[in-house]
Amino acid sequence: MMIAEELARRVRCHAARMVHAANASHIGGCFSMAELLAVLYGQVLKYRPHEPSWPDRDRFILSKGHSTAILYAILAECGYFSVQELLQYGQDGSRLLTHVSHKMPGVEFSTGSLGHGLPFGCGKALAAKRSDKRWRTFVVLSDGELDEGSNWEAILFAGHHRLGQLTAIVDYNGIQSLGNVSDVLELHPLADKFRSFLWDVIEIDGHDVSEITEALLPHRKADGPPLAVLARTVKGKGVDFMENQLKYHYSPPRTEEQLQEVLRQLEGARS
Amino acid sequence: MRTAFIQQLQIEARRNPRIFLVVGDLGYSVVEAFAEEFPDRYLNAGVAEQNMTGLAAGLASEGYHVFTYSIGNFPTLRCLEQIRNDVCYHNLPVTIVAVGAGVAYGNLGYSHHCVQDIGCLRGMPNLTLLSPADPGETRQCVQFLSAHPGPSYLRLGKAGEPTVHELELNFEGPCRLTNGKATNAFVGTGSVLAEAMIAAANLINRGHAVDVFSMTRLTSPDLDNLRDYQRILTVEEHVAAGGLGELLCSGLPRNVKVRSISIPARLTGAVGSQCYLRASAGLDAAGIQHCFETWLAEDHV
Protein backbone atom coordinates (compact mmCIF):
# COMPACT_ATOMS: atom_id res chain seq x y z
CA MET A 1 0.00 0.00 0.00
CA MET A 2 1.35 3.43 -0.96
CA ILE A 3 1.81 6.06 1.72
CA ALA A 4 -1.29 7.94 2.72
CA GLU A 5 -0.26 11.31 1.31
CA GLU A 6 0.31 9.80 -2.13
CA LEU A 7 -2.97 7.87 -1.98
CA ALA A 8 -4.80 11.08 -1.04
CA ARG A 9 -3.19 12.90 -3.96
CA ARG A 10 -4.11 10.17 -6.42
CA VAL A 11 -7.74 9.97 -5.35
CA ARG A 12 -8.08 13.75 -5.51
CA CYS A 13 -6.93 13.53 -9.13
CA HIS A 14 -9.40 10.76 -9.90
CA ALA A 15 -12.23 12.69 -8.23
CA ALA A 16 -11.40 15.83 -10.21
CA ARG A 17 -11.53 13.92 -13.49
CA MET A 18 -14.76 12.20 -12.46
CA VAL A 19 -16.72 15.32 -11.53
CA HIS A 20 -15.35 17.12 -14.58
CA ALA A 21 -16.55 14.35 -16.91
CA ALA A 22 -19.92 14.13 -15.19
CA ASN A 23 -20.28 17.88 -14.63
CA ALA A 24 -21.11 16.88 -11.08
CA SER A 25 -21.06 18.73 -7.76
CA HIS A 26 -19.33 18.24 -4.41
CA ILE A 27 -15.64 18.27 -5.28
CA GLY A 28 -14.96 20.55 -2.31
CA GLY A 29 -16.24 18.01 0.20
CA CYS A 30 -14.37 15.25 -1.58
CA PHE A 31 -11.06 17.06 -1.27
CA SER A 32 -11.62 17.88 2.40
CA MET A 33 -11.73 14.22 3.36
CA ALA A 34 -9.03 12.81 1.09
CA GLU A 35 -6.49 12.23 3.87
CA LEU A 36 -9.15 10.80 6.19
CA LEU A 37 -10.08 8.18 3.60
CA ALA A 38 -6.46 7.55 2.67
CA VAL A 39 -5.53 6.74 6.26
CA LEU A 40 -8.66 4.69 6.83
CA TYR A 41 -8.17 2.54 3.73
CA GLY A 42 -4.40 2.59 3.89
CA GLN A 43 -3.78 1.85 7.55
CA VAL A 44 -6.86 1.41 9.69
CA LEU A 45 -9.68 -0.58 8.11
CA LYS A 46 -9.52 -4.35 7.80
CA TYR A 47 -10.98 -5.45 4.48
CA ARG A 48 -10.57 -7.82 1.57
CA PRO A 49 -11.28 -6.21 -1.82
CA HIS A 50 -11.91 -9.57 -3.44
CA GLU A 51 -14.23 -10.64 -0.63
CA PRO A 52 -16.28 -7.48 0.08
CA SER A 53 -18.62 -9.34 2.45
CA TRP A 54 -15.78 -10.88 4.50
CA PRO A 55 -17.54 -11.25 7.91
CA ASP A 56 -14.64 -9.89 9.97
CA ARG A 57 -14.13 -6.73 7.91
CA ASP A 58 -14.47 -3.34 9.52
CA ARG A 59 -17.60 -1.55 8.40
CA PHE A 60 -17.23 1.84 6.73
CA ILE A 61 -20.25 4.08 6.16
CA LEU A 62 -20.14 7.34 4.25
CA SER A 63 -22.99 9.36 5.68
CA LYS A 64 -22.10 12.43 3.61
CA GLY A 65 -23.02 10.43 0.54
CA HIS A 66 -22.67 13.38 -1.83
CA SER A 67 -18.88 13.10 -1.50
CA THR A 68 -18.81 9.66 -3.01
CA ALA A 69 -16.55 10.42 -5.97
CA ILE A 70 -13.47 10.22 -3.81
CA LEU A 71 -14.73 7.12 -1.99
CA TYR A 72 -15.25 5.35 -5.32
CA ALA A 73 -11.74 6.47 -6.27
CA ILE A 74 -10.21 4.98 -3.16
CA LEU A 75 -12.20 1.75 -3.52
CA ALA A 76 -10.88 1.44 -7.06
CA GLU A 77 -7.32 2.15 -5.91
CA CYS A 78 -7.75 -0.55 -3.25
CA GLY A 79 -8.87 -3.07 -5.85
CA TYR A 80 -12.63 -3.36 -5.36
CA PHE A 81 -13.18 -2.52 -9.04
CA SER A 82 -11.15 -1.10 -11.90
CA VAL A 83 -9.81 2.42 -11.95
CA GLN A 84 -11.01 2.61 -15.56
CA GLU A 85 -14.62 2.32 -14.40
CA LEU A 86 -14.32 5.58 -12.44
CA LEU A 87 -14.92 7.64 -15.56
CA GLN A 88 -18.40 6.09 -15.73
CA TYR A 89 -19.21 8.22 -12.69
CA GLY A 90 -22.63 9.81 -13.12
CA GLN A 91 -22.98 8.66 -16.72
CA ASP A 92 -26.22 7.25 -18.12
CA GLY A 93 -26.71 3.64 -17.10
CA SER A 94 -23.65 3.64 -14.86
CA ARG A 95 -23.60 1.94 -11.47
CA LEU A 96 -21.51 4.80 -10.08
CA LEU A 97 -24.33 7.02 -8.84
CA THR A 98 -23.27 10.45 -7.68
CA HIS A 99 -24.49 9.67 -4.18
CA VAL A 100 -22.88 6.65 -2.63
CA SER A 101 -24.42 3.36 -3.73
CA HIS A 102 -24.40 -0.03 -2.04
CA LYS A 103 -24.59 -1.56 -5.49
CA MET A 104 -20.84 -0.90 -5.69
CA PRO A 105 -18.48 -3.49 -4.19
CA GLY A 106 -17.09 -2.26 -0.90
CA VAL A 107 -19.97 0.07 -0.11
CA GLU A 108 -21.99 -0.98 2.94
CA PHE A 109 -24.80 1.53 2.72
CA SER A 110 -26.34 4.02 0.31
CA THR A 111 -26.83 7.53 1.55
CA GLY A 112 -27.56 10.88 -0.01
CA SER A 113 -30.20 12.20 2.29
CA LEU A 114 -28.25 13.37 5.33
CA GLY A 115 -28.53 12.01 8.85
CA HIS A 116 -28.88 8.34 7.91
CA GLY A 117 -25.39 6.92 8.32
CA LEU A 118 -24.91 7.19 12.07
CA PRO A 119 -28.18 5.47 13.12
CA PHE A 120 -27.36 2.67 10.66
CA GLY A 121 -23.84 2.50 12.08
CA CYS A 122 -25.32 2.24 15.58
CA GLY A 123 -27.21 -0.83 14.44
CA LYS A 124 -24.06 -2.42 13.05
CA ALA A 125 -22.04 -1.59 16.15
CA LEU A 126 -24.78 -2.95 18.38
CA ALA A 127 -24.88 -6.16 16.33
CA ALA A 128 -21.10 -6.55 16.78
CA LYS A 129 -21.33 -5.89 20.49
CA ARG A 130 -24.19 -8.33 21.06
CA SER A 131 -22.34 -11.08 19.21
CA ASP A 132 -18.88 -10.34 20.68
CA LYS A 133 -17.35 -9.52 17.31
CA ARG A 134 -14.18 -7.43 17.23
CA TRP A 135 -14.72 -5.52 13.99
CA ARG A 136 -15.26 -1.78 14.18
CA THR A 137 -17.75 0.54 12.52
CA PHE A 138 -16.60 3.90 11.13
CA VAL A 139 -19.02 6.58 9.95
CA VAL A 140 -17.88 9.73 8.17
CA LEU A 141 -20.25 12.67 8.55
CA SER A 142 -20.18 16.22 7.29
CA ASP A 143 -20.44 19.08 9.71
CA GLY A 144 -23.52 20.47 7.98
CA GLU A 145 -25.34 17.20 8.34
CA LEU A 146 -25.12 17.48 12.11
CA ASP A 147 -28.08 19.84 11.74
CA GLU A 148 -30.18 16.69 11.29
CA GLY A 149 -31.93 15.60 14.47
CA SER A 150 -31.56 11.93 13.59
CA ASN A 151 -27.81 12.26 14.22
CA TRP A 152 -28.41 13.51 17.74
CA GLU A 153 -30.79 10.63 18.39
CA ALA A 154 -27.98 8.31 17.35
CA ILE A 155 -25.32 10.20 19.32
CA LEU A 156 -27.51 9.93 22.44
CA PHE A 157 -28.07 6.23 21.75
CA ALA A 158 -24.44 5.30 21.10
CA GLY A 159 -23.21 7.10 24.21
CA HIS A 160 -25.83 5.53 26.43
CA HIS A 161 -25.21 2.03 25.08
CA ARG A 162 -21.41 2.44 25.15
CA LEU A 163 -20.87 1.36 21.57
CA GLY A 164 -17.11 1.45 21.93
CA GLN A 165 -16.46 -0.08 18.52
CA LEU A 166 -18.28 2.80 16.82
CA THR A 167 -16.26 5.77 15.58
CA ALA A 168 -17.82 8.87 14.05
CA ILE A 169 -15.51 11.07 12.01
CA VAL A 170 -16.72 14.59 11.33
CA ASP A 171 -15.29 16.23 8.22
CA TYR A 172 -15.36 19.63 9.89
CA ASN A 173 -14.62 21.90 6.93
CA GLY A 174 -16.87 24.66 8.20
CA ILE A 175 -18.87 25.20 5.01
CA GLN A 176 -22.31 23.78 4.25
CA SER A 177 -24.70 24.19 1.34
CA LEU A 178 -25.62 27.83 1.73
CA GLY A 179 -22.84 29.25 3.83
CA ASN A 180 -20.51 28.89 6.78
CA VAL A 181 -21.56 26.43 9.45
CA SER A 182 -21.01 29.18 12.01
CA ASP A 183 -23.55 31.35 10.22
CA VAL A 184 -26.18 28.71 9.40
CA LEU A 185 -26.36 26.72 12.64
CA GLU A 186 -23.33 27.02 14.91
CA LEU A 187 -21.93 23.66 16.03
CA HIS A 188 -19.29 25.05 18.35
CA PRO A 189 -18.47 23.78 20.94
CA LEU A 190 -18.91 20.49 19.09
CA ALA A 191 -16.42 18.54 21.21
CA ASP A 192 -18.30 19.53 24.34
CA LYS A 193 -21.56 18.47 22.76
CA PHE A 194 -20.23 14.99 22.00
CA ARG A 195 -18.64 14.68 25.44
CA SER A 196 -21.88 15.63 27.13
CA PHE A 197 -23.51 12.78 25.19
CA LEU A 198 -20.93 10.40 26.77
CA TRP A 199 -18.55 10.09 23.81
CA ASP A 200 -14.77 10.23 23.79
CA VAL A 201 -13.57 13.04 21.54
CA ILE A 202 -10.32 13.61 19.68
CA GLU A 203 -9.80 16.83 17.76
CA ILE A 204 -7.29 16.68 14.93
CA ASP A 205 -6.02 18.37 11.80
CA GLY A 206 -7.91 16.33 9.21
CA HIS A 207 -5.12 16.69 6.64
CA ASP A 208 -2.30 15.50 8.94
CA VAL A 209 -1.92 11.78 8.34
CA SER A 210 -0.03 11.26 11.59
CA GLU A 211 -2.75 12.84 13.66
CA ILE A 212 -5.43 10.92 11.77
CA THR A 213 -3.60 7.65 12.27
CA GLU A 214 -3.05 8.26 15.96
CA ALA A 215 -6.74 9.02 16.41
CA LEU A 216 -8.16 6.12 14.43
CA LEU A 217 -5.73 3.25 14.73
CA PRO A 218 -5.71 2.37 18.45
CA HIS A 219 -7.93 -0.46 19.60
CA ARG A 220 -11.21 0.58 21.22
CA LYS A 221 -12.86 -1.21 24.12
CA ALA A 222 -16.09 -2.94 23.13
CA ASP A 223 -17.84 -1.66 26.22
CA GLY A 224 -16.28 1.77 26.33
CA PRO A 225 -17.54 5.10 25.04
CA PRO A 226 -17.89 5.58 21.29
CA LEU A 227 -15.28 7.81 19.68
CA ALA A 228 -15.88 11.06 17.83
CA VAL A 229 -12.96 12.31 15.75
CA LEU A 230 -13.51 15.95 14.88
CA ALA A 231 -11.28 16.51 11.90
CA ARG A 232 -10.65 20.15 11.07
CA THR A 233 -10.42 20.25 7.31
CA VAL A 234 -10.40 22.67 4.42
CA LYS A 235 -13.09 22.47 1.78
CA GLY A 236 -11.45 22.10 -1.61
CA LYS A 237 -8.09 21.27 0.03
CA GLY A 238 -5.18 20.99 -2.37
CA VAL A 239 -6.22 23.48 -5.07
CA ASP A 240 -5.68 27.14 -4.26
CA PHE A 241 -8.74 28.56 -6.00
CA MET A 242 -11.03 25.94 -4.48
CA GLU A 243 -9.95 26.11 -0.87
CA ASN A 244 -12.61 27.40 1.51
CA GLN A 245 -14.84 28.41 -1.39
CA LEU A 246 -18.56 27.67 -1.12
CA LYS A 247 -18.71 27.66 -4.92
CA TYR A 248 -16.91 24.32 -4.98
CA HIS A 249 -19.62 22.66 -2.98
CA TYR A 250 -21.39 22.78 -6.32
CA SER A 251 -19.12 23.57 -9.20
CA PRO A 252 -16.76 21.05 -10.79
CA PRO A 253 -13.73 22.18 -12.75
CA ARG A 254 -15.90 22.83 -15.81
CA THR A 255 -13.43 23.48 -18.59
CA GLU A 256 -10.54 21.33 -19.74
CA GLU A 257 -8.21 24.18 -18.78
CA GLN A 258 -9.61 24.28 -15.25
CA LEU A 259 -9.24 20.52 -14.93
CA GLN A 260 -5.64 20.69 -16.11
CA GLU A 261 -4.91 23.45 -13.60
CA VAL A 262 -6.40 21.33 -10.80
CA LEU A 263 -4.33 18.33 -11.86
CA ARG A 264 -1.21 20.51 -12.22
CA GLN A 265 -1.57 21.76 -8.65
CA LEU A 266 -2.23 18.26 -7.34
CA GLU A 267 0.70 16.91 -9.34
CA GLY A 268 2.84 19.57 -7.75
CA ALA A 269 1.97 18.07 -4.39
CA ARG A 270 3.39 14.69 -5.40
CA SER A 271 5.48 13.36 -2.56
CA MET B 1 -54.23 -7.92 18.32
CA ARG B 2 -51.13 -6.64 20.07
CA THR B 3 -51.29 -9.59 22.47
CA ALA B 4 -51.63 -12.04 19.59
CA PHE B 5 -48.68 -10.32 17.90
CA ILE B 6 -46.31 -10.53 20.84
CA GLN B 7 -47.30 -14.08 21.75
CA GLN B 8 -46.70 -15.27 18.20
CA LEU B 9 -43.45 -13.33 17.98
CA GLN B 10 -42.23 -15.12 21.10
CA ILE B 11 -43.09 -18.44 19.51
CA GLU B 12 -41.20 -17.47 16.36
CA ALA B 13 -38.24 -16.14 18.34
CA ARG B 14 -37.86 -19.50 20.09
CA ARG B 15 -37.25 -21.23 16.78
CA ASN B 16 -35.55 -18.35 14.96
CA PRO B 17 -32.48 -16.94 16.75
CA ARG B 18 -32.31 -14.01 14.33
CA ILE B 19 -35.55 -12.35 15.45
CA PHE B 20 -34.90 -9.09 17.30
CA LEU B 21 -37.51 -6.73 18.79
CA VAL B 22 -36.81 -3.00 19.01
CA VAL B 23 -39.45 -0.81 20.65
CA GLY B 24 -39.79 2.95 20.65
CA ASP B 25 -40.40 3.27 24.38
CA LEU B 26 -43.93 1.96 23.97
CA GLY B 27 -45.49 -1.41 24.70
CA TYR B 28 -46.20 -1.27 28.43
CA SER B 29 -47.82 -4.55 29.55
CA VAL B 30 -47.22 -5.97 26.07
CA VAL B 31 -43.50 -6.50 25.45
CA GLU B 32 -42.24 -7.41 28.93
CA ALA B 33 -42.43 -11.19 28.53
CA PHE B 34 -40.48 -11.03 25.26
CA ALA B 35 -37.87 -8.79 26.85
CA GLU B 36 -37.48 -11.18 29.76
CA GLU B 37 -37.20 -14.29 27.61
CA PHE B 38 -34.90 -12.78 24.98
CA PRO B 39 -32.85 -10.03 26.65
CA ASP B 40 -30.15 -10.28 23.97
CA ARG B 41 -32.70 -9.76 21.22
CA TYR B 42 -34.73 -6.97 22.75
CA LEU B 43 -34.00 -3.26 22.87
CA ASN B 44 -35.85 -0.13 23.88
CA ALA B 45 -34.48 2.48 21.48
CA GLY B 46 -36.12 5.33 23.35
CA VAL B 47 -38.41 8.00 21.95
CA ALA B 48 -36.41 8.36 18.74
CA GLU B 49 -38.04 6.70 15.78
CA GLN B 50 -35.61 7.86 13.11
CA ASN B 51 -32.72 6.31 14.99
CA MET B 52 -34.83 3.27 15.86
CA THR B 53 -35.49 2.57 12.20
CA GLY B 54 -31.96 3.33 11.04
CA LEU B 55 -30.42 1.11 13.69
CA ALA B 56 -32.97 -1.60 12.88
CA ALA B 57 -31.67 -1.48 9.31
CA GLY B 58 -28.10 -1.70 10.63
CA LEU B 59 -28.95 -4.71 12.79
CA ALA B 60 -30.78 -6.31 9.86
CA SER B 61 -27.74 -5.78 7.63
CA GLU B 62 -25.83 -7.99 10.08
CA GLY B 63 -28.31 -10.85 9.85
CA TYR B 64 -31.12 -10.09 12.26
CA HIS B 65 -34.80 -9.98 11.34
CA VAL B 66 -35.77 -6.87 13.27
CA PHE B 67 -39.29 -5.97 14.35
CA THR B 68 -39.74 -2.31 15.29
CA TYR B 69 -42.77 -1.60 17.45
CA SER B 70 -44.60 1.57 18.38
CA ILE B 71 -47.94 3.33 18.04
CA GLY B 72 -49.53 4.27 14.73
CA ASN B 73 -47.72 7.15 13.08
CA PHE B 74 -44.57 7.01 15.18
CA PRO B 75 -42.75 4.01 13.61
CA THR B 76 -44.13 4.90 10.16
CA LEU B 77 -44.67 8.55 9.23
CA ARG B 78 -42.17 9.95 11.74
CA CYS B 79 -39.38 7.98 10.10
CA LEU B 80 -40.75 7.48 6.61
CA GLU B 81 -37.46 8.28 4.90
CA GLN B 82 -35.58 5.77 7.02
CA ILE B 83 -38.14 3.17 5.98
CA ARG B 84 -37.79 4.17 2.34
CA ASN B 85 -34.02 4.51 2.08
CA ASP B 86 -32.51 2.42 4.86
CA VAL B 87 -34.93 -0.51 4.97
CA CYS B 88 -36.75 -0.81 1.65
CA TYR B 89 -34.08 0.35 -0.79
CA HIS B 90 -31.52 -1.90 0.85
CA ASN B 91 -34.12 -4.72 0.94
CA LEU B 92 -33.39 -5.51 4.57
CA PRO B 93 -35.46 -7.76 6.87
CA VAL B 94 -37.14 -5.16 9.04
CA THR B 95 -40.80 -5.50 9.97
CA ILE B 96 -42.37 -2.26 11.12
CA VAL B 97 -45.19 -2.95 13.55
CA ALA B 98 -47.71 -0.22 14.30
CA VAL B 99 -50.41 -0.68 16.90
CA GLY B 100 -53.56 1.39 16.98
CA ALA B 101 -54.07 1.57 13.22
CA GLY B 102 -57.02 3.59 11.97
CA VAL B 103 -58.84 5.30 14.82
CA ALA B 104 -58.23 2.65 17.47
CA TYR B 105 -56.81 5.42 19.66
CA GLY B 106 -59.70 7.66 18.66
CA ASN B 107 -60.03 9.72 21.79
CA LEU B 108 -56.28 10.38 22.04
CA GLY B 109 -56.63 12.89 19.24
CA TYR B 110 -55.34 13.43 15.74
CA SER B 111 -51.71 12.71 16.58
CA HIS B 112 -52.79 9.13 17.27
CA HIS B 113 -55.12 8.66 14.29
CA CYS B 114 -53.21 6.38 11.94
CA VAL B 115 -55.08 6.96 8.71
CA GLN B 116 -52.49 7.81 6.06
CA ASP B 117 -50.03 4.99 6.65
CA ILE B 118 -51.18 2.63 3.91
CA GLY B 119 -50.95 5.32 1.27
CA CYS B 120 -47.52 6.39 2.47
CA LEU B 121 -46.09 2.89 2.56
CA ARG B 122 -47.78 1.03 -0.28
CA GLY B 123 -45.40 2.42 -2.87
CA MET B 124 -42.19 1.53 -1.07
CA PRO B 125 -39.92 -0.84 -2.99
CA ASN B 126 -39.68 -4.44 -1.76
CA LEU B 127 -42.21 -3.83 1.03
CA THR B 128 -44.92 -6.30 2.04
CA LEU B 129 -47.82 -4.57 3.79
CA LEU B 130 -50.10 -6.74 5.92
CA SER B 131 -53.21 -5.44 7.66
CA PRO B 132 -54.84 -8.25 9.65
CA ALA B 133 -58.49 -8.16 10.66
CA ASP B 134 -58.39 -10.04 13.93
CA PRO B 135 -56.09 -11.82 16.40
CA GLY B 136 -56.05 -15.04 14.35
CA GLU B 137 -54.98 -13.20 11.21
CA THR B 138 -52.37 -11.40 13.27
CA ARG B 139 -50.81 -14.70 14.35
CA GLN B 140 -50.79 -15.91 10.76
CA CYS B 141 -49.17 -12.65 9.62
CA VAL B 142 -46.36 -12.96 12.17
CA GLN B 143 -45.77 -16.55 11.08
CA PHE B 144 -45.72 -15.52 7.43
CA LEU B 145 -43.40 -12.55 7.93
CA SER B 146 -41.02 -14.62 10.04
CA ALA B 147 -40.86 -17.21 7.29
CA HIS B 148 -40.41 -14.52 4.60
CA PRO B 149 -37.99 -11.98 6.07
CA GLY B 150 -37.83 -8.73 4.15
CA PRO B 151 -39.04 -5.16 4.38
CA SER B 152 -42.56 -5.32 5.75
CA TYR B 153 -45.22 -3.39 7.58
CA LEU B 154 -47.66 -5.01 9.99
CA ARG B 155 -50.66 -2.79 10.64
CA LEU B 156 -52.33 -3.83 13.87
CA GLY B 157 -55.39 -2.74 15.78
CA LYS B 158 -55.10 -2.43 19.51
CA ALA B 159 -56.70 -4.89 21.92
CA GLY B 160 -59.92 -6.80 22.29
CA GLU B 161 -60.78 -7.16 18.61
CA PRO B 162 -63.35 -9.91 17.94
CA THR B 163 -62.49 -12.99 15.93
CA VAL B 164 -63.83 -12.49 12.41
CA HIS B 165 -62.91 -15.89 10.98
CA GLU B 166 -60.63 -18.87 11.43
CA LEU B 167 -59.68 -19.56 7.83
CA GLU B 168 -56.14 -19.92 6.60
CA LEU B 169 -54.80 -16.91 4.69
CA ASN B 170 -52.87 -17.51 1.48
CA PHE B 171 -51.12 -14.09 1.54
CA GLU B 172 -51.43 -13.69 -2.20
CA GLY B 173 -54.77 -11.97 -2.45
CA PRO B 174 -58.03 -11.30 -0.64
CA CYS B 175 -59.37 -14.17 1.47
CA ARG B 176 -63.04 -15.01 0.87
CA LEU B 177 -64.89 -15.49 4.14
CA THR B 178 -68.31 -16.41 2.72
CA ASN B 179 -69.63 -18.97 0.23
CA GLY B 180 -68.79 -17.04 -2.94
CA LYS B 181 -72.24 -17.23 -4.46
CA ALA B 182 -73.14 -13.55 -4.32
CA THR B 183 -72.79 -11.05 -7.15
CA ASN B 184 -71.69 -8.25 -4.84
CA ALA B 185 -68.96 -8.17 -2.22
CA PHE B 186 -67.55 -6.25 0.71
CA VAL B 187 -63.78 -6.09 0.86
CA GLY B 188 -62.34 -4.86 4.13
CA THR B 189 -58.93 -4.50 5.69
CA GLY B 190 -58.03 -4.35 9.35
CA SER B 191 -60.30 -4.76 12.34
CA VAL B 192 -63.13 -2.78 10.73
CA LEU B 193 -63.77 -5.91 8.68
CA ALA B 194 -65.83 -7.14 11.65
CA GLU B 195 -68.35 -4.39 10.88
CA ALA B 196 -68.60 -5.53 7.27
CA MET B 197 -69.29 -9.09 8.44
CA ILE B 198 -72.17 -7.88 10.62
CA ALA B 199 -73.51 -5.77 7.78
CA ALA B 200 -73.39 -8.75 5.40
CA ALA B 201 -75.27 -10.93 7.90
CA ASN B 202 -77.93 -8.26 8.31
CA LEU B 203 -78.32 -7.92 4.55
CA ILE B 204 -79.00 -11.63 4.10
CA ASN B 205 -82.02 -11.19 6.33
CA ARG B 206 -83.11 -8.38 4.00
CA GLY B 207 -82.77 -10.50 0.90
CA HIS B 208 -79.33 -9.42 -0.30
CA ALA B 209 -76.50 -11.91 -0.33
CA VAL B 210 -73.06 -10.25 -0.15
CA ASP B 211 -69.71 -11.99 -0.10
CA VAL B 212 -67.06 -10.71 2.30
CA PHE B 213 -63.31 -10.68 1.74
CA SER B 214 -60.46 -9.91 4.07
CA MET B 215 -57.77 -7.93 2.29
CA THR B 216 -54.84 -8.66 4.53
CA ARG B 217 -52.13 -8.07 1.95
CA LEU B 218 -52.14 -4.58 0.49
CA THR B 219 -49.03 -4.74 -1.68
CA SER B 220 -49.01 -6.56 -5.01
CA PRO B 221 -52.19 -8.51 -4.29
CA ASP B 222 -53.59 -11.06 -6.70
CA LEU B 223 -57.14 -9.79 -7.32
CA ASP B 224 -58.35 -12.66 -9.50
CA ASN B 225 -61.10 -13.74 -7.14
CA LEU B 226 -62.68 -10.27 -7.22
CA ARG B 227 -62.92 -9.91 -11.00
CA ASP B 228 -66.39 -11.34 -11.47
CA TYR B 229 -68.32 -9.27 -8.95
CA GLN B 230 -70.71 -6.57 -10.13
CA ARG B 231 -70.25 -4.28 -7.15
CA ILE B 232 -67.51 -4.14 -4.57
CA LEU B 233 -67.76 -1.94 -1.52
CA THR B 234 -64.45 -1.42 0.24
CA VAL B 235 -64.22 -0.71 3.95
CA GLU B 236 -61.14 0.75 5.61
CA GLU B 237 -60.10 2.87 8.57
CA HIS B 238 -57.88 5.02 6.40
CA VAL B 239 -58.36 8.08 4.24
CA ALA B 240 -59.43 7.46 0.66
CA ALA B 241 -56.12 8.68 -0.78
CA GLY B 242 -53.76 5.76 -1.20
CA GLY B 243 -56.04 3.29 0.52
CA LEU B 244 -57.78 0.02 -0.23
CA GLY B 245 -60.49 1.60 -2.38
CA GLU B 246 -57.95 3.19 -4.68
CA LEU B 247 -56.00 -0.05 -4.82
CA LEU B 248 -59.02 -1.99 -6.07
CA CYS B 249 -60.13 0.76 -8.46
CA SER B 250 -56.80 0.65 -10.18
CA GLY B 251 -56.42 -3.12 -10.07
CA LEU B 252 -59.81 -4.39 -11.20
CA PRO B 253 -61.39 -4.35 -14.67
CA ARG B 254 -63.91 -1.63 -15.42
CA ASN B 255 -66.88 -3.97 -15.33
CA VAL B 256 -66.41 -4.25 -11.57
CA LYS B 257 -67.94 -1.18 -9.93
CA VAL B 258 -66.06 -0.12 -6.82
CA ARG B 259 -67.20 2.22 -4.09
CA SER B 260 -65.39 2.92 -0.88
CA ILE B 261 -66.08 3.90 2.67
CA SER B 262 -63.10 5.48 4.35
CA ILE B 263 -62.24 8.15 6.90
CA PRO B 264 -63.50 11.44 5.43
CA ALA B 265 -61.63 14.73 5.65
CA ARG B 266 -64.37 16.21 7.83
CA LEU B 267 -63.28 13.86 10.64
CA THR B 268 -59.75 15.31 10.71
CA GLY B 269 -59.16 16.11 14.34
CA ALA B 270 -62.47 14.63 15.52
CA VAL B 271 -62.21 12.99 18.90
CA GLY B 272 -64.14 10.04 20.22
CA SER B 273 -64.09 6.32 20.74
CA GLN B 274 -63.36 4.00 17.84
CA CYS B 275 -67.09 3.08 17.78
CA TYR B 276 -68.09 6.73 17.66
CA LEU B 277 -65.64 7.63 14.91
CA ARG B 278 -66.52 4.56 12.85
CA ALA B 279 -70.20 5.49 13.04
CA SER B 280 -69.37 9.10 12.15
CA ALA B 281 -67.54 7.87 9.05
CA GLY B 282 -70.25 5.39 8.08
CA LEU B 283 -67.82 2.57 8.84
CA ASP B 284 -70.01 0.79 11.39
CA ALA B 285 -72.27 -2.08 10.32
CA ALA B 286 -75.30 0.19 9.99
CA GLY B 287 -73.36 2.67 7.85
CA ILE B 288 -71.97 -0.04 5.59
CA GLN B 289 -75.44 -1.57 5.19
CA HIS B 290 -76.94 1.82 4.42
CA CYS B 291 -74.27 2.64 1.87
CA PHE B 292 -74.78 -0.66 0.10
CA GLU B 293 -78.57 -0.46 0.03
CA THR B 294 -78.43 3.10 -1.27
CA TRP B 295 -76.14 1.92 -4.06
CA LEU B 296 -78.55 -0.87 -5.01
CA ALA B 297 -81.44 1.57 -5.02
CA GLU B 298 -79.54 3.92 -7.33
CA ASP B 299 -79.00 0.98 -9.67
CA HIS B 300 -82.69 0.01 -9.37
CA VAL B 301 -81.84 -3.43 -8.06
Image (tube, grey):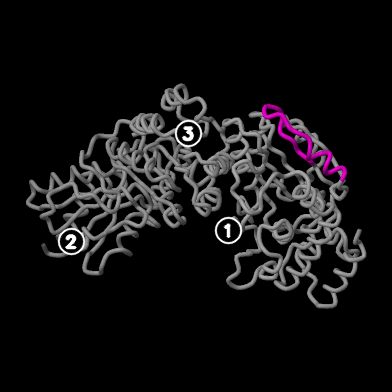
Report the residue marked by disc 1: A103
Tell me the CA gap for discs 2 and 1.
45 Å
The three-letter code of the residue at mark 1 reads Lys
Q: How crowded is the residue under tag 3: few (<14 C-alpha within 10 Å), some, or many (20+)?
A: many
Q: Chain of mark 2?
A: B
The three-letter code of the residue at mark 3 reads Leu
Q: Of label 2 and label 3, which has the lower sequence position?
A: 3
Write down the quadrant of residue B144 in the picture.
top left
Please state if B38 lies on the left or on the right of A166 as rendered: left
Write down the quadrant of residue B27 in the picture.
top left
Q: Foreground residue, B107 or A73?
A: A73
Report the residue marked by disc 3: B21
Q: Chain of mark 1?
A: A
Tell me the CA gap for discs 3 and 1.
28 Å
Question: Looking at the image, do the residues carrying marks 2 and 3 touch, with CB atoms under 8 Å apart?
Answer: no
Give coordinates of residue B37: x percent, y percent: 44, 23
Q: How crowded is the residue under tag 2: few (<14 C-alpha within 10 Å), some, or many (20+)?
A: some
In magenta stretch: residue A219? yes
Q: Foreground residue, B200 or B93?
A: B93
Tell me the CA gap for discs 2 and 3.
42 Å
Report the residue marked by disc 2: B229
The three-letter code of the residue at mark 2 reads Tyr
Q: What are the residue bounds of the magenta stretch? A: A210-229
In magenta stretch: residue A235? no
Label 2 vs label 3, nearer the camera: 3
